[in-house]
Image (cartoon, rainbow, N blue to C red):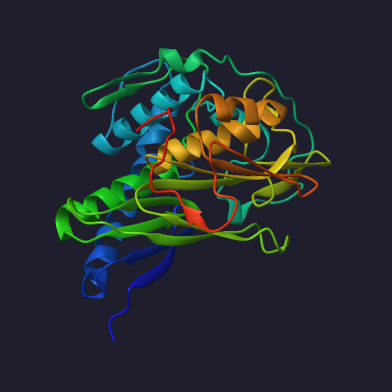
Amino acid sequence: MARDQAEWSALGTYVQLTVADATKLSSAEDTARALLDRIDAACSRFRADSDLSRVNAAAGRDVSVSPLLAMAVEVAVQVAGHTQGIVHPLLGDTMVRLGYNTTYSQLDAGRVTDITTAPVDLDAWRDIRVSEGSVRIPAGHSLDLGATGKAWAADIIAQTIVRELGVGVIISVGGDIAVATPEGQVASWPVEITEHPDRPGHTQIVQLGEGGLATSSTQVRRWSVAGITAHHLIDPRTGAPAADVWRTVTASGPSAVAANAATTAAIVLGEEATEWLNARHVAARLVASDGTITTTGGWPTDEGGLNEPDVALVS
């Protein structure tokens, strides 16, 4: 019997791919793996030979890059604009100061014993320039696409599989989920919303018919730095990990990028998150540090559909 789901690791996280026609899974997996390899080569902060690393090394100057990095940076700039810099693409130096200068699996907990944090200019992203075949970032700054890269990868992989193979698909790249369906077809994919295995309970199943779904958490990528516990979701207003107001936020959107922009912004905004999400009509589920669940924007209270995402961030 042909499989309809594949799982593997890429971009420092897990990938889960399901297609509506099991006979096309092998081709869909080949397409996804090839794209992820190209994305890693272009966009990784942890590879000295990546286009992104070359851009960071030449901050203040135009650098010739692959179309993939140019596209990824354009998306990151759009998200920064829609979130007023709360989801910021120029946090590379901040991540390094916090000890996150290698892939998470290789982090040496406690290796960094002295750190300083400082706010990042919330408008610095406005000075990023993307033109055909080149990217320039402002001098004194460093790119990090961790906030948008996996969601963007999920989106383009889903779109490519539909275009090339004509089959409906749902793909999760580290919890950033994209759904795509050939024109004229309708699908409904059940998605289980759950927290980290160390925190049982709070599980819900929703139906996703199009667009994207993303989850951001302060509980997963955590490490010790200078005697404190840090995580990868940075508040650019302080240069420090976002306060643990919400341990998990899940949101839907017209794309995985839009959903991820909402969840990342919500984690960073903390107490301001629910007002911010409701003002933008974002369907979201927020789990507070004490386990209390809050929902916004028409998130289903029980098993239900998220077939008409209404996130006014990015498409």
Q: Is residue 227 visible?
A: yes
Q: Position of residue 308 (x, y in %)?
A: 38, 43
Residue in view at x 74 percent, y 25 percent: 116
The residue lying toward the viewer, choosing from 249 and 80, is 249
Q: Is residue 174 visible?
A: no
Which residue is most to the bottom?
1
Residue 86, quarter of the rendered image? top right
Residue in view at x 36 percent, y 59 percent: 188
Q: Position of residue 67 (x, y in %)?
A: 24, 35
The residue lying toward the viewer, choosing from 59 and 224, is 224
Which residue is most to the right?
227
Residue in view at x 52 percent, y 34 percent: 262
Residue in view at x 53 percent, y 40 percent: 298
Q: Quadrant of the N terminus?
A: bottom left
The residue lying toward the viewer, choosing from 169 and 119, is 169
Q: Quadrant of the C terminus?
A: top left
- The answer to whether 153 appears left or right of 46 in the picture is left
Q: Position of residue 54 (x, y in %)?
A: 38, 32
- The answer to whether 159 appears left or right of 297 in the picture is left
The answer to whether 270 is drawn above or below residue 4 in the figure is above
Residue 42, quarter of the rendered image? top left
- The answer to whether 200 appears left or right of 150 in the picture is right
Query: What is the count of numbered marks?
Result: 0
The residue lying toward the viewer, choosing from 181 and 129, is 181
- The answer to whether 239 appears left or right of 225 in the picture is left
Q: Position of residue 196 (x, y in %)?
A: 66, 58
The answer to whether 146 is drawn above or below residue 32 in the figure is above
